[in-house]
Image (tube, rainbow, N blue to C red):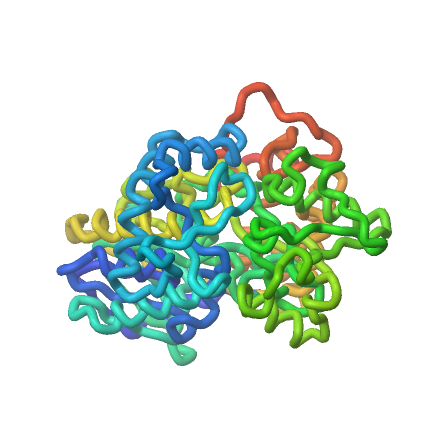
Amino acid sequence: MALLSAPARAERVDLDGVLVIGAGLAGLCAALAAAPRQTMVVNPVPLGEGCASAWAQGGMAAALSSDDNPDLHAADTCAAGAGLCEAEAVRILTSEGPDAVRALAALGAPFDRRDDGSFAQSLEAAHSRPRVARVGGDGAGRAIMTAVIAAARKAEHVQIREGVRARALLTDVLGRVRGVLAEADGSLVEIHAPAVVLASGGIGGLYAVTTDPAAVRGEGLAMAAAAGAEIVDPEFVQFHPTAIDLGLDPAPLATEALRGEGARLIDAAGVPFMSRYHPAAELAPRDVVARAIESERRAGRGAFLDARPSLIPDVAHEFPAVFAACMSGGVDPRRQPIPVLPAVHYHMGGVATDLTGATTLPGLFAAGECASTGVHGANRLASNSLLEAAVFGARAGRAARDALAMSCRTLTPFAPPDLPEQTLRELRQRMSRDAGVVRDATGLTRLLAWIFGAEAVCGPALPLTTARLVAEGALARRESRGAHFRADHPVAFADAEHTRRTLRDTAERRRYAA
């Protein structure tokens, strides 16, 4: 399939400020923090739609109570990260986290409160104490995004352009990122800016079963990689253990807070099984719970989340989003267990950044799920994602605001081809099968062979680029660590090391292997 080049007379937009790609929590926090510099936010769909931030149920983890502190939060974060968290990034997250939650509350995010006005906080897996600030039990993401979207629309320095899909990064002859080649109303447009913040979200749409918007396919990560950016730990994909198994795409999520409040995982015979897999049972780290559920399902025993009144007295009131999703699929959680299965939920890997959000490419910053800030390591701690988006999104926005660029000739890139729907469907099935909860060399090698074949036919479509990075990283990591489990290499190495690669690296390895 031929690549689409930018036409000679493509519309050109010049922005003397910050260009933000993506309008989830990280992108909008970056845009607000870039004040007073002129800022443009581009997003392929209306704000609040197709955005994983808005779907988050649990809330934001932060040391907000008198019996908690940032050091305890940091210790839990690093324990979950299985040796790959960067200590200074975690310190920033946990120390700046409480103020980030309070700032969102000041914007109008209606966090649940106790009678004394303090934040009501839930206990989630791998946290040593309740520290997840929530909204309406399980409605944090939507409520927080509503408040932040309203603030962004009111901000005089922020211009929002919806219906604009980024296709490729613009770079100059020196390799500095200068903007983006985007598609709007079927036409290509070049948006030039001295600084770009990439906040394009995760990779859930590359998998057949995901809790994320299906259109989120790692395209921002692939654009950065295509421009030469370093990618860190692409193999670390987190599977939420308790997606609701109703055959829907995306799969509705049964928040981890349910288990924090007492819900239990049982098999089809009603027997609890998590104590066989981990001493913390239902509150074990997500990767352990996901593999346990996968094992029970493969053994034919099934997996269900029991949230009936003996365990959760009023699930309809306490967890309205979960209750509504179940009822829409014909499951009444007050009377029957909820069928669950693991689903792709979060990507720990991403575009390498420093503590300000700067990537290895001058002029390009990254924040949110597409970035690798060093916070999550090999396995994200529950409810740290919205917190990271707020804390590091704002940091990226401030750094981009202060970035300056000398005038230099910009190169006109190609817009990569779209992936045919049939090929995309097959990619998602193959990613779930061969780069899923449990992996091995046979499946990953088979997956890569198929991806290379698809690239030969379809061209370098962005979803294929990201899928290749994930599969190559998973094949190269011959150990099991955090969310990455190799059935043929089940033991973790004594020393934890990051995967760092560029597309040039992978091309060289492929040429050498051939």
**Residue in the picture at 71% in, 29% down:** 489
Residue 234 % position (x, y): 53, 43
**Residue in the picture at 70% in, 43% down:** 291
- The image shows residue 204, relative to residue 391, as above or below, that is below
Q: In the picture provided, is 250 more to the left or to the right than 231?
A: right
**Residue in the picture at 41% in, 33% down:** 72
**Residue in the picture at 44% in, 55% down:** 59
Residue farthest along the bottom direction in this orientation: 185
Residue 465 shows up from this direction: no
Q: Nearer the viewer, residue 139 or 412?
A: 139
Q: Quadrant of the C terminus?
A: top right
Residue 456 % position (x, y): 63, 55
In the picture, residue 142 is in which quadrant?
bottom left
- The image shows residue 357, relative to residue 326, as above or below, that is above
- The image shows residue 379, relative to residue 6, as above or below, that is above
Residue 158 % position (x, y): 22, 68
Residue farthest along the top direction in this orientation: 494
Q: In the picture provided, is 36 more to the left or to the right than 88?
A: left
Q: Nearer the viewer, residue 34 or 2?
A: 34
In the picture, residue 207 is in which quadrant?
bottom right
Residue 355 % position (x, y): 30, 38
Q: Nearer the viewer, residue 10 or 499?
A: 499
Residue 106 shows up from this direction: yes
Residue farthest along the front direction in this orientation: 115
**In this figure, what is the number of numbered marks?**
0
Q: In the picture provided, is 115 more to the left or to the right than 35?
A: right
Q: Quadrant of the N terminus?
A: bottom right
Q: Nearer the viewer, residue 251 or 444?
A: 251
